Amino acid sequence: GDSVTQMEGPVTLSEEAFLTINCTYTATGYPSLFWYVQYPGEGLQLLLKATKADDKGSNKGFEATYRKETTSFHLEKGSVQVSDSAVYFCALRNTGNQFYFGTGTSLTVIP
Amino acid sequence: EAGVVQSPRYKIIEKKQPVAFWCNPISGHNTLYWYRQNLGQGPELLIRYENEEAVDDSQLPKDRFSAERLKGVDSTLKIQPAELGDSAVYLCASSFREQTQYFGPGTRLLVL
């Protein structure tokens, strides 16, 4: 079946460091891909998305490119801030409108 | 614009007791989702509604879980009887057709 695999955490970085959180997926057809963020004590929020191969989603300095050849959608940010500390979830929506989420990666940014 | 509203935010019950969660989606969103999120895991879909119709309930444990979405607006998810393993966060989300999902803050359930 369809699934999402993302790198396990927790990840701890110093402020202004480069961030990569790996995400790969398994799906038939052409899913849409998403990154959601969950700040402490809050619900999930959509961070960015891409709906077709080679699309790049971006928001708040975060980017991810839909790579069909490697079935990946890695999340990157060039310079993280303390306020980026959160749990990040990679997700896909398949052609049947079913959503599958990864297990989440906890990021802590220290000053 | 108001977001997805869920209540209660927290619930503590003893095992074998019933419990119900309520969700009011964003106005105009015809699709409503219920997810369960276990500690340290991602959300897992329990049921998805398109208007009043449950179009995907394959992951809903039907022996003890039930859900309804009367009039295609707000929804209730019920567990009866609750078991220890049901302790989790129950998330509601809504979207307009197949567009972006918006999540509520969740209901944190603890079964003792």
Image: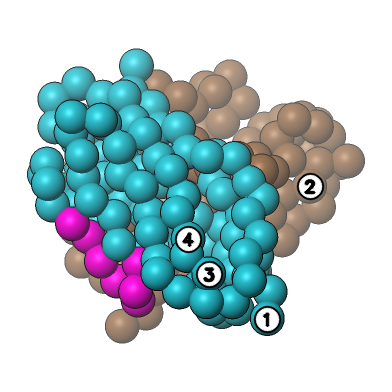
Query: Which residue lies under the disc numbered 1?
Result: A111
Q: Amino acid at mark 4?
A: Leu
Where residue A65 sits in the image (x, y, percent)?
A: 23, 51
Measure how far apart labels 3 and 2 are at the Cα level: 38 Å
Where residue B71 sits in the image (x, y, percent)?
A: 28, 53
- Circle 1 SS class: loop
Please provide the residue range marked out in magenta. Answer: A56-62
Which chain identifier belongs to the cyan chain?
A
Q: Nearer the viewer, residue A46 or B14?
A: A46
**Compared to B16, does B76 lie above or below?**
below
Q: Amino acid at mark 2?
A: Leu
Report the magenta stretch's main SS: strand
**Which is more foreground, mark 3 or mark 2?**
3
Horizontally, residue A86 falls left or right of residue B33, namely: right
Query: Which residue lies under the disc numbered 2?
Result: B110
Q: Amino acid at mark 1?
A: Pro
Q: Nearer the viewer, residue B36 or A5?
A: A5
The residue sitting at 18% across, 57% down in the picture is A56
Horizontally, residue B31 falls left or right of residue A100, namely: left
Which chain identifier belongs to the brown chain?
B
Near mark 1 (Cα within 10 A), the count class, few <14, some 14-19 or many ≥20, is few
Q: Amino acid at mark 3?
A: Ala
Locate residue A72: give its quadrant: top left
Measure how far apart labels 1 and 3 are at the Cα level: 10 Å
